[in-house]
Amino acid sequence: MKPTFLGHDRPLATAMIVDRESDSIIRQMKNAKANGADAFGLQLEYLNKDQMNEETFKKIFNGAGSVPTYVTYYRSRTNEGKTDDELAEGLLTIAKCGATLCDVIGDLFDKQSDEVARDERAIEKQMRLIDQLHAEGAEVLMSSHVLKFTPAERVLEIALEQQRRGADICKIVTGADNKEQEAENLKIVTLLKKELKIPFLYLSGGECSVLRRVGPMLGCCMWLCVDERNEFSTASQPSLAQINMVRGSF
């Protein structure tokens, strides 16, 4: 049966694996699976330049076996300096090589501070890219990293727009610098659950991190967590061991 991020009856514990070498990524995937990961998140923009090729991508996805893979291919790291058209072509190659879920940044072809494209021609290109990714058999997540506290009305507006553009999963990352904002973010999860027709991942940066731990118990479709930390790991992502405890408690 083909791996998928859709249609599960419980949130997935997605172990984020960030490394420069494919062999290390494959080793970490095996360990994460043994430690209870349901899926892998692979930030392929971190790969060394000599590993940015179809042979390496296929090797990584073969190493994942039957476990679904969520893949980012952002503008940073090894991709720094590439055009958005080159990033789109890279995503299509990654989809052809076996990725389950491809992350299309929400401001692709029209860079914006909140990662939400506004130019209609750019939006049309995004929608064509999503159709192409679907044709390759991949699922699509659209992400907008706003990275600051955002009122519920705006979060819902972004989510509905991502849904309209054809994403299978909506991802929005905002912020919370105090307990009041964190409480509001927890309420936003219930709003998204009520209003969206597609699964969603709602995250928050900043001082408060409760959302990253309990959000999936309220409606988010997955956790982004870390099994093995290194210099590239996102500090705000909880450990897989912590998430296993959260799931057990609930």
Image (spheres, rainbow, N blue to C red):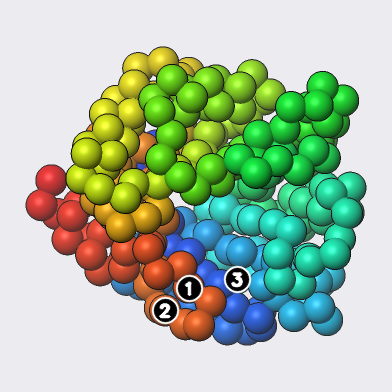
Can the viewer see residue 188?
Answer: yes
Q: Which mark is residue 41?
A: none
Q: Which mark is residue 229?
A: 2
Q: Position of residue 53 (x, y in %)?
A: 84, 70
Q: Position of residue 57 (x, y in %)?
A: 74, 67
Q: Position of residue 31 (x, y in %)?
A: 41, 77
Front disc: 1 or 3: 1
- Secondary structure at badge 3 equals helix
Residue drawn at the location 68% of the way across and 24% of the way down: 165
The N terminus appears in which quarter of the rendering? top right
Q: Are marks 1 and 3 in contact (CB under 8 Å)?
A: no
Crowding near pointer 2: few (<14 within 10 Å), some, many (20+)?
some
Residue drawn at the location 76% of the way across and 43% of the way down: 111
Kind of residue at disc 3: Gly
Q: Which quarter of the figure has residue 79?
A: bottom right
Crowding near pointer 1: few (<14 within 10 Å), some, many (20+)?
some
Q: Earlier in the sequence, mark 2 or mark 3?
A: 3
236 or 166: which is nearer to us? 236
Q: Are marks 1 and 2 in contact (CB under 8 Å)?
A: yes
Would residue 210 appear left or right of 28 to someone viewing this image?
A: left
Front disc: 2 or 3: 2
Residue drawn at the location 87% of the way across and 25% of the way down: 121
Residue at numbered disc 3: 63
- Secondary structure at badge 2 equals loop
Q: Which mark is residue 233?
A: 1
